[in-house]
Amino acid sequence: MALAPIPKVVLGSIAFAIFWILAVFPAVPFLPIGRTAGSLLGAMLMVIFRVITPEEAYAAIDLPILGLLFGTMVVSVYLERADMFKYIGKLLSWKSKGAKDLLCRICLISALSSALFTNDTSCVVLTEFILKIAKQHNLPPHPFLLALASSANIGSSATPIGNPQNLVIAVESKISFGEFLFGIVPAMLIGVVVNALILIAMYWKLLSVHKDIEDPIAEVAAEEDVNSHQFSPATMSHYSSSLNSQELNGYIVESSSIQNSPQVHNLRNRLVSSDSEIDRFHVGSTIDSARNSTASKEGTNNDLASQESKTVVEVDRTIEAHVLISSEGKEYLSADWKRRLWKSCVYMITLGMLIAMLLGLNMSWTAISAALALVVLDFKDARPSLEK
């Protein structure tokens, strides 16, 4: 391969240097335009300096790679909305036996999740859970964050969708998803184990410090944050998210029983009969009764009637409140059932995408088909998910 003319080599090197600086340092003072715009600027300079022709520039764009990357990123966004990473985060602290056990779990879970959902998504989402767990148990966070970053990079090497570099290798070399997976998984597992052992050896003393007293306030706050963290705007604004289905069923049964309870009917009947007795008392009173006695009785009757009227109003308000809770509870149960069904469908579509890739179908079109299936299933404007 002959060396290009010196002017073209110099101009090409200048264009590449501008791209490299903006990609590595996206907020440089003289041109803070970011990585994406910096990449486009470097590509445009290559064409302007005539290092490559416009036709060669268009040919360098690999649509299968971009399609596969786009599809997997959209699927990852919908998995976030379906609380997949929240469940993965809960696995980190489920029956944990100490700091070393937590570090090993982070290494394994981050490696597996990055292999299936890209390493970028795994690092961004799991970082929040790791910080909360470390705060809850009064542990230093940096060993666990290093475990997350290193293991996510190691685990992402196992599949073509783990990182963009794997996409290029798999698509250009025409290696199938299954061949790529089974060829890299043994090395990936060994790398994860070695990485965990190195981190444990590096931070043995730090991880061996036992904290006898946990911070109860931090524990409650961390639990509330994990439970309330949502990756989508699909939350119930009119009802507390902490109310579970059993409590709602209790409210529904209680409200229906209050409306039909004999105590309420007896109270209403007693109030009606009291009003009738008061009327009969007024009609049957003699004209010759003493004025002071009549005035006293009328005052007592008026007080009794006023008190009973207030009781009726309070009973009506109580019934209305329980009816309102009952209707809101039914709406919440209906929305909760629909969300559970939607989440199950998201998981099945994602699993179907992985199975199709293992069977050797075109990875790009499989990922795009899964992404569009999730968009249609969501039945909402897809702009927020696509922007993310």
Image (cartoon, rainbow, N blue to C red):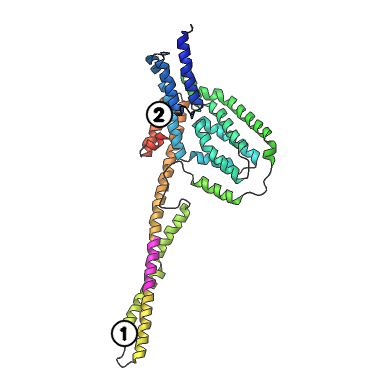
| Rendered view: 163 above or below 253 | above
Q: Is residue 278 magenta?
A: no
- Is 313 within the magenta? yes
What is the three-letter code of the residue carrying label 2?
A: Ile
Say if 47 sits above or below 222 in the image. Answer: above
Can residue 91 be seen by looking at this rendering?
no
The residue pinned by badge 2 equals 368
Q: Position of residue 188 (x, y in %)?
A: 58, 27
Mark earlier in primary sequence (1, 2): 1
- Mark 1: give few (<14), some (14-19) or many (20+) Cα within 10 Å: some
User: Residue 180: x and y, percent?
Assistant: 52, 23
> Given the current orientation, which residue lies at the most extreme top position?
2
Question: Please, what secondary structure does the residue beneath circle 2 have?
Answer: helix
Residue that carries the numbered disc 1 in the rendered image: 282
The region drawn magenta spans 309-322
Q: What residue appears at the point 48 percent right and 23 percent down from the top-left corner?
A: 167
* Figure disc tally: 2
Q: Specify the amino acid type for callout 1.
A: His
Taking the image as shown, residue 32 lies to the left or right of residue 191, namely left
Nearer to the camera, 319 or 145: 145
Q: Position of residue 293 (x, y in %)?
A: 36, 89
